[in-house]
Structures are given as structure tokens and as C-alpha cells.
Amino acid sequence: MDRRVIEQKLESLRYCVERVRHKCPSDVATLRADPDAQDIVTLNLSRAVQLCVDVGAHIIAESDLKAPDTMGETFDLLAAGGFVDETVAENLKRAVGFRNVAVHHYEAINWDIVHAISMHYLDDFRAFASAMSEQSQ
């Protein structure tokens, strides 16, 4: 396992999470009315999800686990292998759905969901980063 690659990805993940934390307005109405904040938050949440999938794939490749068939399955496998908490894995699996909407159907984004992720679920990304950092040691 290339620890340097994983640590670089985890540092990028931390950066994305902090950008979301700093740039997401405190209320959803402001987010709905601010296209710049929408772009910053959506891009960084999408990147955060992708970085989690990438790091998870590295960890899985070095384990005895089978390769995931989908991005979401990455988190199921990591939880089954004891690499990450099941609740964190489930929340990140749902975040893959958000990422897919953001990447493929920008006009269909539900800003209430984006705001909820930004306000209440950033700790899942942090917990994932912490767990993966321990695995790469």
C-alpha cells in the first residue's frame, strides 16, 4: 500500500470538508439563493465522496476482501471488514447517491439535502479519514 498516496488523498478529503464547513451558509434559504456557495459546497462534497471511495478502494485492494462492484459497496465492504464503523459506512454509501446526482444531474439537486449533509454529516467524513489513516500506518 502506498501510504503517501493515501495520506495525500486524506489530506485532500480534509481540505474539502473544511471548505464545505466554511462556505455552507447556516440556513438553507441562503444556500438556495447563492449559486457561488452552491458550486463550492457541491463540488467539495462530491470530491469528498470520491476521495473516500478512492481511499477505500486502496484499503480493500490490500486486504482479503473482494473488489466492490459499485462505489457504494466500497463502504459495505469496509464496514464488513472492520475498517470503518457501520453507521459511517452507511452514511457514506448514501453520500454516493448525492454525488451521483451532483455529477450527473446538477439541476436536480435538492438543496435541503445538501445543507443537511453540510450541517450534520461532515463528521462521517472526518471519522472515515481517521479510520483510514490508522489503516495506512
Image (cartoon, grey):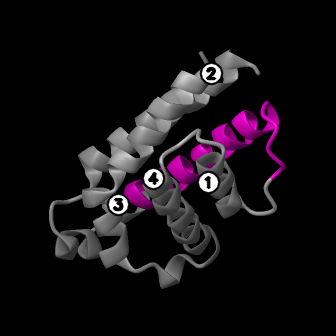
Give the Cα separation between the discs numbered 4 and 3: 29 Å
Contact flag, marks 4 and 3 (Cβ < 8 Å): no
Sequence-wise first label, 4 or 3: 3
Which residue lies under the disc numbered 2? Answer: 136
Give the x, y percent position of residue 16.
44, 42
- Residue 25: horizontal and vertical position, in percent? 20, 60
The residue carrying pointer 2 sits among few (fewer than 14), some (14 to 19) or many (20 or more) residues within 10 Å by Cα, namely some
Residue 131 left/right relative to 58? left
Give whichever of discs 1 and 4 has the lower sequence position: 1
In the drawing, does residue 22 fall left or right of residue 72? left
Corner quadrant of residue 17: top left
**Dot 3 corresponds to which residue?**
36
Residue 136 in the image: above or below residue 132: above
Q: Which residue is mark 1?
A: 75
Q: Of the residues shown, which amino acid type is indicated by label 2? A: Ser
Location of the C terminus (image quadrant): top right
The image quadrant of residue 102 is bottom right
Q: Secondary structure at mark 3?
A: helix
Q: Amino acid at mark 3?
A: Asp
Q: Residue at x 64, y 57 (%)?
A: 76
First in sequence: mark 3 vs mark 1? 3
Q: Name the kind of residue labelled 4 in the image.
A: Val
Of residue 38 and residue 76, the one placed in the foreground of this image is: 76
Q: Which residue is mark 4?
A: 88
Distance, label 2 to label 1, CA atoms, is 17 Å
Q: CA distance from mark 3 to mark 1?
A: 31 Å
Element type at mark 2: loop
Q: Residues within 10 Å of mark 3 (few under 14, many from 20)?
A: few
Residue range in magenta is 40-67
State which mark lies toward you, 2 or 3.
2
